[in-house]
């Protein structure tokens, strides 16, 4: 039993986003909405939603091509066409009466095997199924996606005792493997898990900032990265969600929460926030919210609101002494810091963490389910129980006692050993009965963190490690900040290739971090440039080329397993792999021209070779060169693994794993399958023919036209010329043949020429200072 066809009813932001992500998973889906009064096109709402999503950034579709899997319709003419759907997701307005009317019309239409689910975030399942037949109740559940559905990984699933267990298992499996979600089982309680805790946390963070007289910038810096919260912090998050949405969520919770719930005691309506909403400051979708952009002359200036007066003034990012002073001591040091900022951190965490501890087992049977829900639904780096362990469960409980607060029973149980502990290399979590149980891993999930608990690296230096993944497969991991690449990475990669070739069968390139690799370490490069150590720069370029070539022609299969960013040298690393098993959310590209350089670790060479063998390209030598020139010259980054295949950064034969947690296991399985199939390394290309100066002239004309149109800057033209020289083969012509070493030599020469250019150095400095490209 699986989902071959689906439908979503409700073409608003959430409904259309869910439909788009079902299409991303390759599932044909109908998108229905009501018929507006007097509409000539009776399906205009759904059709308009599809067109809007094709223009939205960040894009709901992983590729514009999958939009064809979404068929627009309406709830008056097309309900009958849902009779062959396996999964119907209801995403209409949060009104039980509206939902009940829709379910009554759906019930006689759906097939017995189908699942009907609601995307509700606040209405209990027991209310939704009132008056429905036993058969409908057996097919019904809540599947709560988070916005935006493509990018937020949490899927909360709520079922009732009468729900068919096989149907629940099917939706869990589809959510996990095909949609890439972290599926968390929730109990049928108000707000389920993430919104129950998240709404409380937001209210507490706002209350305490106002009471302590903090600015929104101060609060966001304290509640942000030090606590593992995205850089938006709490006020930036509310701007993103919508100030006007928060009161609606609060009122819905207040109608269903138990009378003694702590949220009732801390909820309050602030007059400044009420006035912001009334004046149209509803967040990013409106004129702004706690932050806004105001035009001042030719530029826009970021402003923030004063929480006491409601007046806006230019936003400044203060230096928080408490945060700086406690970097070494971490979260425990921050909440203990004798300052208003330390007091704020303590007040927010003390209330939030004790609230979460008091909700288990009411909302979830496990603490790791709660932590996963907050990590995936609110993008926290650590869940509430992981945060409690970082402070110290006993420290947290003792301070609560000292300040006259009740200590939840679960926190009392954790005082001795914490919420999590490692036993024989296996992570265990505290259970409400007082025992510790292993944190389960789904079948087909392999985490490098679990391997690290039970083993030591085979090889290690300051920038990378090599791990034994089991079954004769090694795992190469870059360990620098943002997985940036340097000479130590290249050195260990060479040693890892030698060790794997001697003692193992295959290698996987992988990282448990957010990103695969952001490319070369620009900070280190700028230091070397500033002291004019040009020989070291050239050695790094040549060393990277040799390491990647050795990987490409190693006597065993090498499989890349990227997720997140794989830019510059990180992309080049993947281009030299025998195969890639990429997370669906992989953002891959050769972006060197953005900082005034050209790819120097074989990226030009590999992209040329791929485009030359593309059976779909037009005949002649110029089309593949022009295609690569456009992609590299404009520093294109694929915004999904699907787009990476379309741009040639991934092969059509490379795999895509939708669930980030399954990438490593899938990559390892792919490597072993290649071994089993009798892997032999690739043969060097017999001949590479490039047109030389004639092709370079053609590319120069194209750049000149871009410059006349105001698209290309003066230094863009310089960089484009250097790139064109590499891609055209230098001074060769179409009658001559080149080998890979010749193209690599052209890459090195172009890179060294550009890295010495003052305009390139200015671009690198600007990127390091602002994280934005300089258009000089």
Image (cartoon, helix red, strand yellow):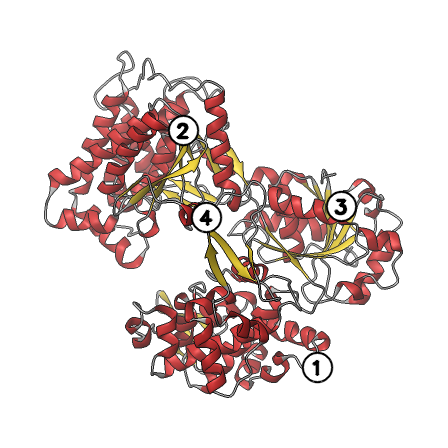
Closer to us: 22 or 335 = 335
Q: Quadrant of residue 269?
A: bottom right
Q: Residue 450 carries which label?
A: 4
SS at badge 4: helix
Contact flag, marks 4 and 2 (Cβ < 8 Å): no
Q: Name the residue under label 3.
A: 166
Q: Residue 259 carries which label?
A: 1
How far is mark 1 from mark 2, CA to CA? 59 Å
Crowding at dot 1, Cα within 10 Å, few <14 / some 14-19 / many 20+, comes out as few
Give the mark nearest the N terminus, 3 or 1. Answer: 3
- Camera-side mark, 4 or 3: 4
Q: Which mark is residue 506?
A: 2
**Residue located 35% across and 32% down the image:** 629
How far is mark 2 from mark 3, CA to CA? 38 Å
How far is mark 3 from mark 1, CA to CA? 35 Å
Contact flag, marks 1 and 2 (Cβ < 8 Å): no
Asked whether residue 4 appears in the rendered view, the answer is: yes
Q: In which quarter of the image is residue 72?
A: top right
How far is mark 1 from mark 4, CA to CA? 42 Å
Q: Which mark is residue 660?
A: none
Give the mark nearest the N terminus, 4 or 2. Answer: 4
Q: Relative to 523, does residue 707 appear above or below in the rendering?
A: above
Closer to us: 206 or 270 = 206
SS at badge 3: helix
Give the mark nearest the N terminus, 1 or 2. Answer: 1
């Amino acid at each position: 039993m699986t989902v071959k066809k689906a439908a979503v009813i409700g073409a608003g932001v959430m409904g259309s986003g869910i439909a788009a992500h079902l299409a991303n998973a390759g599932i044909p889906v109908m998108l229905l909405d009501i018929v507006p009064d007097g509409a000539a096109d009776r399906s205009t709402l759904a059709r308009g939603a599809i067109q809007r999503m094709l223009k939205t950034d960040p894009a709901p579709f992983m590729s514009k091509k999958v939009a064809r899997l979404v068929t627009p319709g309406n709830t008056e003419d097309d309900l009958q066409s849902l009779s062959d759907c396996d999964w119907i997701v209801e995403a209409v307005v949060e009104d039980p009466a509206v939902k009940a009317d829709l379910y009554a019309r759906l019930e006689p239409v759906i097939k017995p095997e189908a699942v009907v689910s609601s995307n509700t975030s606040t209405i209990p399942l027991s209310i939704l199924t009132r008056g429905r037949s036993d058969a409908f109740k057996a097919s019904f559940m809540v599947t709560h996606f988070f916005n935006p559905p493509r990018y937020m990984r949490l899927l909360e699933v709520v079922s009732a005792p009468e729900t068919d267990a096989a149907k629940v298992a099917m939706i869990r499996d589809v959510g996990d493997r095909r949609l890439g979600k972290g599926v968390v089982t929730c109990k049928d309680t108000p707000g389920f898990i993430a919104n129950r805790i998240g709404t409380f946390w937001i209210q507490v963070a706002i209350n305490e900032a106002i009471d302590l007289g903090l600015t929104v910038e101060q609060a966001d810096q304290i509640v942000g990265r030090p606590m593992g919260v995205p850089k938006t912090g709490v006020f930036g998050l509310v701007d993103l969600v919508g100030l006007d949405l928060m009161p609606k969520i609060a009122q819905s919770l207040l109608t269903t929460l138990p009378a003694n719930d702590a949220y009732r005691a801390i909820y309050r309506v602030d007059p400044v926030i009420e006035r912001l909403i009334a004046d149209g400051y509803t967040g990013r979708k409106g004129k702004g919210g706690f932050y806004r952009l105001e035009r001042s002359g030719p530029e826009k200036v970021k402003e923030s609101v004063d929480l006491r007066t409601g007046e806006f003034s230019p936003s400044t990012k203060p230096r928080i002494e408490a945060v700086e002073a406690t970097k070494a001591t971490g979260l425990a040091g921050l909440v203990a810091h004798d300052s208003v900022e330390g007091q704020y951190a303590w007040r927010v965490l003390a209330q939030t963490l004790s609230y979460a501890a008091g909700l288990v087992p009411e909302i979830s049977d496990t603490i790791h389910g709660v932590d996963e829900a907050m990590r995936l639904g609110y993008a926290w780096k650590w869940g509430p129980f992981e945060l409690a362990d970082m402070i110290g469960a006993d420290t947290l409980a003792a301070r609560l006692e000292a300040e006259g607060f009740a200590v939840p029973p679960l926190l009392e149980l954790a005082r001795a050993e914490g919420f999590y502990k490692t036993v024989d290399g296996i992570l265990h979590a505290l259970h409400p009965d007082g025992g510790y149980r292993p944190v389960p891993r789904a079948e087909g999930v392999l985490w490098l963190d679990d391997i690290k608990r039970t083993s030591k690296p085979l090889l290690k230096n300051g920038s990378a490690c090599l791990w034994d993944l089991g079954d004769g497969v090694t795992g190469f991991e870059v360990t620098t900040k943002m997985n940036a690449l340097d000479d130590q990475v290249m050195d260990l990669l060479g040693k890892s290739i030698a060790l794997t070739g001697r003692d193992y069968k295959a290698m996987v390139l992988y990282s448990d971090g957010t990103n695969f690799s952001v490319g070369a370490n620009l900070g280190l490069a700028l230091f070397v440039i500033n002291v004019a150590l040009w020989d070291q720069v050239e050695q790094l370029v040549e060393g990277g080329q040799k390491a990647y070539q050795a990987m490409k022609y190693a006597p065993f299969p090498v499989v890349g397993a990227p997720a997140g960013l794989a830019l510059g040298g990180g992309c080049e690393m993947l281009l030299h792999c025998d195969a890639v098993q990429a997370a669906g959310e992989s953002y891959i590209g050769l972006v060197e021209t953005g900082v005034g350089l050209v790819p120097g670790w074989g990226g030009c060479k590999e992209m040329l070779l791929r485009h030359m063998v593309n059976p779909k390209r037009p005949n002649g030598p110029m089309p593949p060169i022009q295609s690569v020139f456009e992609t590299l010259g404009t520093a294109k980054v694929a915004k999904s693994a699907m787009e990476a295949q379309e741009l040639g950064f991934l092969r059509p034969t490379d795999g895509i794993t939708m669930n980030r947690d399954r990438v490593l296991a899938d990559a390892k399985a792919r490597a072993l399958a290649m071994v089993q199939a009798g892997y032999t390394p690739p043969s060097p290309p017999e001949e590479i023919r490039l047109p030389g100066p004639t092709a370079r002239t053609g590319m120069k004309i194209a750049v000149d036209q871009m410059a006349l149109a105001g698209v290309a800057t003066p230094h863009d033209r310089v960089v484009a010329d250097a790139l064109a020289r590499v891609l055209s083969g230098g001074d060769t012509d179409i009658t001559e043949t080149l080998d890979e070493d010749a193209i690599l030599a052209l890459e090195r020469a172009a890179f060294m020429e550009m890295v010495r250019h003052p305009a390139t150095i200015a671009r690198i400095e600007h990127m390091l200072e602002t994280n934005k490209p300089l258009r000089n």
